[in-house]
Amino acid sequence: MSPADPNELPSLSPGQLEIMDVIWQQGEATVAEVWKALSARRKVARNTVLTMLTRLEEKGWLARKADAHAHVYRATVARETTLGTMLDQLVETAFGGSTAGLVMTLLQSRRISKDETARLRALIDQAEARSKGRGDRRAGS
């Protein structure tokens, strides 16, 4: 099965995204493994996890294979691809396409550590270097 396109799949609810995160972290998992991981965070019924996994498979987010004693689920879309698509949609709809608007809102509404600040500065420096390397004339250079 080829990877799915997250633009072609129904959006994920917070609960579905939480399940996908478990699958992405583990690579593949059974109902029991997903239930155990979620139960460590909050109270959740095993049948609820099974229902959500089944729905995620029906929607195309997961693929299932039968193992000796259980069904094993794996993601059909990589985590980075999914989150990138979700973030692109958020930037377009909530910030009018402005990446700066997103970053400024995050910086104004959340505390960041010195390490995070240093990483952000390094990423900005790298982005600027890439723009200069391409001869970006949009900024009047």
Image (cartoon, rainbow, N blue to C red):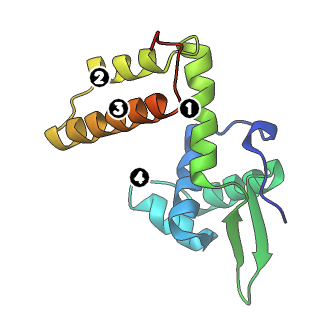
Q: Nearer the viewer, mark 2 or mark 4?
A: 2
> How far, Cα to Cα, is label 4 from label 1?
26 Å
The disc, 2 or 4, on the residue closer to the chain's N-terminal end is 4
Which comes before the other along the chain, label 3 or label 4? 4
Please give left or right for residue 86 compared with residue 123 in the image: right
Which secondary structure, mark 1?
helix
- Label 1 environment density (alpha carbons within 10 Å; few <14, some 14–19, many ≥20): some
**Residue type pointed to by label 3:** Ile
N-term-proximal mark, 4 vs 1? 4
Amino acid at dot 4: Arg
Are there few (<14), some (14-19), or many (20+) residues within 10 Å of tag 4?
few
- What SS does tag 3 mark? helix
How far apart marks 2 and 3 lie (CA) works out to 14 Å
Residue 40, given in percent of the width and then of the height, sits at 39, 61
Q: Which circle's residue, 2 or 1, is located before the other in the chain?
A: 1
Q: Residue under circle 2?
A: 107
Q: Nearer the viewer, residue 66 or 123?
A: 123
Q: Label 1 amino acid?
A: Leu
Residue 87's disc number: 1
Q: Which sits earlier in the primary sequence, circle 3 or circle 1? A: 1
Label 3 – label 4 distance at C-alpha: 37 Å
What count of labels does the image hold? 4
Provide the residue designation for mark 3: 124
Q: CA distance from mark 2 to mark 1?
A: 16 Å
Read off the residue under disc 4: 42
Residue 16 in sight from this viewpoint? no
